[in-house]
Image (cartoon, rainbow, N blue to C red):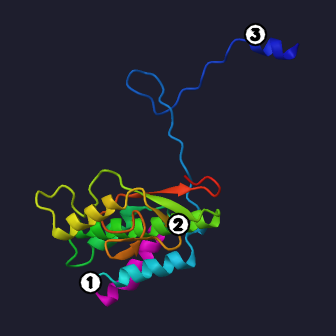
Amino acid sequence: MSWIRSLLQPISKPTRNKNHSRSGQSMPTMPTVKFDPSSVSKSVKENLRRNIEMLDDLGKKHIQPIYKVALRSVLAGGDQRILYMALTEIEGITQGRAIEITRSLQNKAREQINRERMLSLGITHAKWMYPNAPCMKDPFSSCPSAADIQQDSAHSLANGKKYEISKGLFVDGKWTWPGFEEGCKCLPKVILPGMEE
């Protein structure tokens, strides 16, 4: 009978959220996912370093300090602000270029972390999903570059193609993964083992 009594008890007044709207009603809090820094493997760190070394506009003296900041940024779950701020302090790096570098390094690290996570779960294949948004460095440009147009076209043609996660898909003359190239907004759609379409 105690469960009946609990049903008949008046419902307690909900606690009020500190973040409330102007109308006085409480707003639900957004659930968050805590980033696991252990997902940043040795290979992610090596590739991050390699990607920084490939940047033409960074002098050799800036590679190690930028690598340290970029790694800290990735370990913090993709905190782009700290990397952006460090890059803007380098002479000759414009704010726009700092944004490009930050976005590129973060996207490549995130894509590799996700790829390694899928493989660790036994997921070996995925489909390339084109987002119907231009895969270009500057999609708002009134005159996109030939390279941007070619990349967007190639990524659009890759839509729905199955690929091996460890290998990637041969797109636009190279092996790559969704979200890896500059300006790419594509995503992988995992194919669960035994659930192939």
Give, as a single range, the part of the protein colored magenta.
59-73
- Amino acid bearing label 1: Asp
Please name the residue shown 50% across and 40% down the image. Answer: 30
Mark 1 and mark 2 in contact (Cβ < 8 Å)?
Answer: no
Residue 135 sits above or below residue 5 on the image:
below
Q: Gap between marks 2 and 1, in whole Å?
A: 27 Å
Q: Residues within 10 Å of mark 1 (few under 14, many from 20)?
A: few
Instruction: Give the percent coordinates (x, y) of residue 23.
Output: 39, 21
Say whether disc 3 or disc 2 marks the residue closer to the N-terminus: 3
| Residue 83 found in image quarter | bottom left
Residue bearing the label numbered 1: 56
Please name the residue shown 70% across and 11% down the image. Answer: 10
Q: Which mark is residue 70?
A: none
Residue bearing the label numbered 2: 115
Magenta stretch secondary structure, dominant: helix
Looking at the rendered image, the disc whose residue lies closer to the viewer, 3 or 2, is 2
Instruction: Give the percent coordinates (x, y) of residue 140.
Output: 18, 55
Considering every residue shown, the one lying at the far right of the view is 1
Q: Gap between marks 1 and 3, in whole Å?
A: 71 Å
Q: Gap between marks 3 and 2, in whole Å?
A: 51 Å
Q: Does 90 lie within the magenta span?
A: no
Looking at the rendered image, the disc whose residue lies closer to the viewer, 2 or 1, is 2
Nearer-the-camera pick, 156 or 83: 156
Say whether disc 1 or disc 3 marks the residue closer to the N-terminus: 3
Residue 7 sits above or below residue 40 on the image:
above
Instruction: Give the percent coordinates (x, y) of residue 131.
Output: 35, 52
